[in-house]
Every structure is written in structure tokens, then in C-alpha cells.
Image (tube, rainbow, N blue to C red):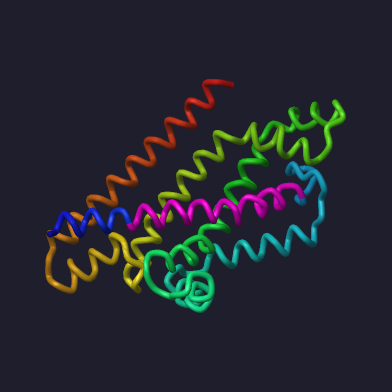
Amino acid sequence: MLWNLVWQSTLETLSMVFFSTLFSLILGLPIGVLLCVTGPYSQGGLKPKPILNKVLSRIVNVLRSFPFVILMILLFPLARIIVGKAIGTTAAIVPLSIAAAPFVARIIETALKEVDPGVVQAARAMGSTDSQIIFKVLLPEATPSLVSGVTLTIINLIGYSAMAGVIGGGGLGDLAIRYGYQRFRPDVMAVSVIVILIMVEVIQFTGNKIASKMLERR
């Protein structure tokens, strides 16, 4: 019985983390690229637009600093519109994605700014357009840093998914609260925490390996 619950909750957590990572990348990638491109020339900006950059930066900062539990509650109506319900594993993907998107945007912005300016200047000298520099120079060159950033995003989302379980999001957090804490089953709580720790270790190890392999191939 316990292991069936743990297995089901683990699958729910993996589902939440996978889809929220995917959607946060879809949301965060263009914002991160835009933050980099519209930044100052001295910071790698291709088309500096100070006002747009500051507005985007403020929005990202506000969303990043918003407590996740409060954000999830505020997004209940949006989740109900998108997936037809406000609680549950599927519904939790909506606030998880929105909460992680600003984090992803900052990771992408930072990774792109770390690309050697000489590479960008060489591409510019060869007549490359801005879009070609972004998609054929900046993003490929920043791939190892992006992989490390995505790894951190996944790990953060595992933590967020556990918090989502406290207010009906399902997954291992829900298992630990409902079957562990509320029913005075410390063994259930311990197993839930151990599974989460194992997931984090596996993801961190895999992400580091992939990033290292990419760096070796350069």
C-alpha cells in the first residue's frame, strides 16, 4: 500500500516537473534573449533599448521574488481557465511554469552575456544578422551554461512541486502532508523526503555530466 502511494506520487511529481520545465522554457527563453539583446553594448546587447530592458527586468524581478504559495493561490482562476480545475497535479503545472519562467529568463540572460564578445564581433564582421548571431552564435556557445541553468531550474521546481502539494497540488509533497504529517506516519514523510533527495541528486549528476561533455567537445 505504502509503496503504491509513493510510486503514484513520484509519477505525479515527475509529471509536474517535466511539463512545468518545458513550459517555463517556452516562456522564459524569449524573455531571457530579449533581456540580453536589449541590454547595453557593454553587456553584450545587440540592440540596446534601455526602457524596454528596464521594464522587462523589473517584471522579472517582481515575479522571481513573489512567494510561490501565494502565487499559486492567486493563479487558481487562471489554472481553472486553462485546465478546467484549480487543484490537482495538472492544475499545479500552471503556477509552477509561471513561477519558474522568470528564473529561466535570468539564467538565459546570464548565460548569453557570458559568451566571449570576440566571437560575436567575428560573426558581425562576417556579415551575420542579429537573428543569426542569436541563434547560430550566442545560443550554441552558451549551451553548457544553459544546461547547468536548466538543471537548477528542475531542482527548484522539485522543491516548488513539494510546496504545491501542501495546497492540493498532488505529488510527493501532498503524500508527505496528508499521509505522513496528518496521519502521524513519520515513515511516510521520511520516504517522501528520501525520494525527493534521490531525484535531486540524479538530476544534478546528470546535468553536470551533460554540461561537462559539451565543454569537452568544444
The residue lying toward the viewer, choosing from 116 and 14, is 14
Q: Is residue 34 magenta?
A: yes
Q: Is residue 2 left or right of residue 14?
A: left
Q: Is residue 124 above or below residue 79?
A: above
Name the quadrant containing residue 31. Answer: bottom right
124 or 9: nearer the viewer = 9
Residue found 32% across the figure and 70% down from its top: 166
List the single residue furthest toward the top: 217
Give coordinates of residue 72: x percent, y percent.
Answer: 46, 72
Q: Main secondary structure of the magenta part?
A: helix
- Horizontal side of 206 relative to 103 (left or right) equals left
Report the span colored magenta. Answer: 12-37
Quadrant of the frame with the C terminus? top right
Residue at x-position 67% and y-position 52%: 30
User: Which residue is pictured at 59% across the width and 53% down the height?
Assistant: 26
Residue 181 lies in the magenta stretch: no
Q: Residue furthest front?
A: 84
Relative height, residue 125 to residue 108 (above, below) = above
> Residue 136: x percent and y percent?
71, 33
Quadrant, the N terminus: bottom left
Q: How many marks?
A: 0
- Which residue is at 56% across, 40% downward? 146
Left or right of 195 in this view: 207: right
Residue 17 image offset from top left, x and y in percent:
41, 54
Image location of residue 189, percent across then percent down: 19, 61
